[in-house]
Image: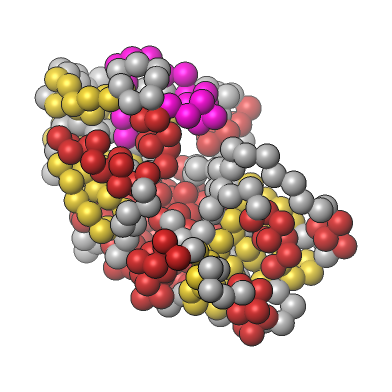
Amino acid sequence: MKAVAKLKPEPGAMALIDVPVPIRQPGEVLIRISAGGICGTDVAIWKWHEAVVGQYAPQFPLIVGHEFAGTVVESDSARVRPGAVVAVNPQIACGHCRYCGLGRPTLCDDRRLMGGRINGGWTEYVSVPEWNTHPLPPGVDSAVAPLLEPLSVATHAVLERVPVRAGDVVVVIGAGPIGILCAVLALSAGARHVMITGVAEDARRLDVARQIGAITVNIDVQDPMKVLQSLQVDGADIVYETSGVASTLEQAVGMTRKGGSVGLIGLCHAASTFKSTPVVIKELTLIGSRGYNETTWSLMMNVLPRVERDVQRLITHQVGFEDFGQALEMVARREGIKIVLRP
């Protein structure tokens, strides 16, 4: 079968190669892949950014891709039967460290991410632990399945780590896929207003955010603080930082009302400085949010029927595996919103 694989620990060095079809082990299900998504982590693996790939220590060749979904073709599980369309939680935790015991496998001491440390899903077939597969709820369009991994990241942030309450005014800094998905979930949770910021190059993304009901701000031509104060004079109840830009942490703190919360989701690899006095004076809560736990996926599946149409708006391009290089270039150039790869 064909697979997109990283061949060496250096920039580039990625190719479409032939690999054997995996043999399903006890407790696993074999899935025929229908689609996979691309995110910034995949670009970082392609370009071999040490700040990202140092988290994984992969062996080569490594089949890339941690956002993927497909149809079960072999299974012994009563929960996940052949023919079921499933999304896959690509996070394989050890199950016995302190953090797994606390129900937080995203912090697992031996966390293995498919497509980052072990083989992932940009291929034709993959065998994964049955526990990591999640059948779509009845009536949900299967086209949304490859977006459920990034949706779970947003779910963890918006519904678990820094939960939105009905009537909240929410700001999302960054109009990438995770930022837009955070906006979708905040609106679904009952936020009174959701404001999302981006730059001129994000025009298409901001347009999609506007379609889902968010208030959009192009910071190249508008003052986001003025727009926010027109919504709630003393600032946002919650600010989610999804851009990973060093300068936005101070902005997030400045936009949050007294007693409010800042959710840090974007990965910033540059040095960042900000004055801590406002955090103290305003008694702000700063919370990091990484990945997802098993509880997140169950919660997301319950929410999915309400948000699936808005989630699907993010798909702007569909590309065959053979054109993976072109697709990675498009993501690196911030073209479109969500690019889906198909075998």
Quadrant location of the C terminus? top left
Colour logic: secondary structure
Residue 22, picture quadrant? top left
Is 335 placed above or below 164 here? Answer: above
Residue positioned most to the bottom:
230
| Residue sitting nearer the eye, 272 or 252 | 272
| Residue at the spot 18% in from the left edge and 46% down from the top edge | 319
Is 132 placed above or below 299 here? Answer: above
Residue 134 visible in this rendered orientation of the protein: no
Tell me residue 285's x, y (percent). 74, 56
223 left or right of 278 in image: left
4 left or right of 249 in image: left
157 left or right of 208 in image: right
Is 52 covered by the magenta stretch? yes
Residue bounds of the magenta highlight? 48-65
| Residue sitting nearer the eye, 91 or 11 | 11
Tell me residue 33's x, y (percent). 18, 38
| Residue at the spot 27% in from the left edge and 58% down from the top edge | 315
Residue 127 visible in this rendered orientation of the protein: yes
Tell me residue 235's x, y (percent). 70, 74
Quadrant location of the N terminus? top left
Residue 323, picture quadrant? top left
Magenta region, main secondary structure: loop
Tell me residue 200's x, y (percent). 45, 65
| Residue at the spot 24% in from the left edge and 36% down from the top edge | 325
- Looking at the rendered structure, the number of numbered marks drawn on it comes to 0
Is 120 placed above or below 266 here? Answer: above
Is 75 covered by the magenta stretch? no
| Residue at the spot 41% in from the left edge and 75% down from the top edge | 210
